[in-house]
Amino acid sequence: MQARDEKMSDRRRYGAWMAIGGLLLALISGSLGCQATDEYLRNRTSKDTLVPQTIAPPHQPAGQASKDGIVAAAAESAADDSGILQIGATQISPPAEGGAPPSSVAALLKAASMPVDKRIENTEKKWTAAQPPRPQRSQEIPEKSQDAAAPDAYRVDHTLPSPEAGMAIPTIPSSDTVRPLSLAAALAQAGMENPVINIARQAVVSAQGLQLQARVLLLPSVNVGANYDNHTGPLQASFGAIRKVDRQAIYYGLGANTVVAESVKIPGLFINTPLTDAIFEPRVARFLVANRSFLATATRNDIFLEVSTTYLALMNAETRLAIIRQSERDFEEVARLTASFANRGKGRYGDAERAAADLQALRYEEQQAQQDVAVASADLAQLLNLDPSIRLVTGDVPLQVVQFVDPQIPLPKLLEIAEQNHPAILAASAAVRGSQVRVRQETTRPLLPILWMGFSTGDFGGGAVATTNGTGVFNPHTGNENLVPSITAAGGKTTPPFGKISGRIDVDVLAYWQLQNMGFGNLAHIRERRAQRNQAEANRLRVLNEVREQVSVAYNTSAEQFRAIALQRRRVQEATDGFQRDLITAFRGVVLPIEVLDNAKRLRAAREALLEAVIGFDRAQFQLFVALGQPPTLVVEDDKPAPPPPPRTEQPSEKK
């Protein structure tokens, strides 16, 4: 035990002397140790070299923020402190040939005394949204022969990866079909295929059918038909006598169901409508169509908002996967350093195992992030009515900060705009107007008559055989008191031929007033309609409060997330610089590499927090825009430039 304590004490003294020696050499050379080590890192020749380079989006020069994508928005300048990180990616540069790690502390001290290139120092101090690609190290800084024995070093990536970088490696579970999809294409697909939107549209068509029906209440119904009647047996005459009658009758034409001396029971042109309904039902139907139309618009906007937020969730999942893979390289470097220190006896094997365990935990989170990508793709496919087995990806669509609403507009003005334009509020207002018309309809119902009109025309004919029930009774068929047969038959009966068939016209007009249940039924209907009106007014107030709450929450969230973007950007910058400095001190042997692990975790958390701030701001902007009653399709343009027109081929006739 005593020998072990002495060994640890010697090791601490050795490390202290090495730190003092490095500081003295740095002071002698006239530059700080961190800057000298930074110069060394730029001129190293390790096989693990990582040089951050920014990959510009397609169809766009390097270092220029993309203007395609979700919408031309308020993406801040890359070099401005108030801006936001643009999408970048990292490329692994090929290792320099002939590099060898240092074998002694003298090489570290020698590297610490190197002068710092001011051009490189100024470049590293800038935190830009998208840096232009760096030239190869052989072109940027000449290799120095005295750095051939410099130790391995690691350059921390200063860029936030793009969603496309997260899908560079196939995710698990994999899919046979991958479909890149822009937000504009997703909204167009939802507008045509989403079943909820289609249901709302059919509700409007149904209301339009009811409106047409209300407008034609005073138009007659047309009935065309025929009837045949054959009666045998006793029948009471209109003057009270009982007769035995064998009778036949036929009618055909406009209308049906008529026998002997009566009007046509089913008129050919028929109207039976309360005038109250004929006056008020078209007005009620007009407000019903307006209500269904505004509700369909609100449903469409809600689905478009859900598609937009789900698309952002997919982009968030892809970018988070890229961040995790980016952080894995940082954790791998820490694990490599701790293992190297442990193998050389300068660190504990427990530290190396701890770093390796944290690396494995991060790789497990990568698998969870891959699952999140698959789930977000399935959610988007459900909204677009697509096959969920197809893996939807955002492709080369950049992640941007979008701004649809001018932040200078005060909240009260936005609330006023929402109250005047939100389709849900307009739908509730139309329902209130319709319920008010219903109240007036029931109030005036007892005052207006019910109109009954019938018109029939057709051919009618028939014949009969009749006897009296005794003598002395006038027989209207023959005009005599006793039956005088024209053709003698058994029993003294008359058997006239089937009568002549000829045309006839019947017109019937009725108008009557009705008090339902002695007027109490009308009173009950009036009270019911008033209660429905009060419910509609209360529902409008509820919808108004919900829209106000949506506008207020989205407005405040948008403002908070916009400020958070700048804070998180500085947090990423400081975490990156701190992690880089700790790596430098670890390379110099001042601290143990395990102490750098916490900074690697903080850097990863800062990157994810910046991503959440950007996604949160974009989501809040979509929510605010929809809460103001506007669809996202007004501001979302195609994310990719239009393809160039095909080259024009000269016709043979033109050559002549």
Image: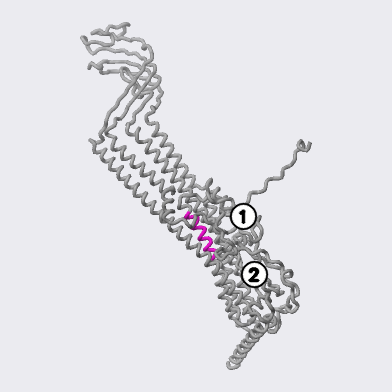
Q: Quadrant of the N terminus?
A: bottom right
Residue 602 in the image: above or below residue 185: below
Q: What residue is shown with label 1?
A: 178
Q: Amino acid at mark 1?
A: Val
Check disc 2 and report the residue beneath it: 123
Q: Nearer the viewer, residue 543 or 405?
A: 405
Residue at 30%, 45% (x, y): give it: 531
Report which quarter residue 327 is drawn in.
Answer: bottom right
Q: Secondary structure at mark 1?
A: strand
Q: Nearer the viewer, residue 28 or 656?
A: 28
Residue 467 appears in the rendering:
yes
Q: Tell me the residue at 31%/37% (across/down).
A: 441
Task: Describe residue 244's horizontal placement relative to residue 196 as left or right.
Answer: left
Q: Earlier in the sequence, mark 1 or mark 2?
A: 2
Question: What is the CA distance from the residue labelled 1 to the residue labelled 2?
Answer: 39 Å
Residue 272 image position (x, y, % from top left):
34, 29
Residue 398, image quadrant: bottom right
* Pick the front one: 409 or 486: 409
Q: Residues within 10 Å of mark 1 (few under 14, many from 20)?
A: few
SS assignment at label 2: helix
Amino acid type, residue under disc 2 in the picture: Thr
Residue 347 vs residue 506: left or right? Answer: right
Which residues are drawn in magenta?
610-624
Q: Position of residue 72 (x, y in %)?
A: 57, 54
Q: Looking at the picture, how far across and down is residue 242, in whole percent?
A: 24, 16
Res. 583 mark? none
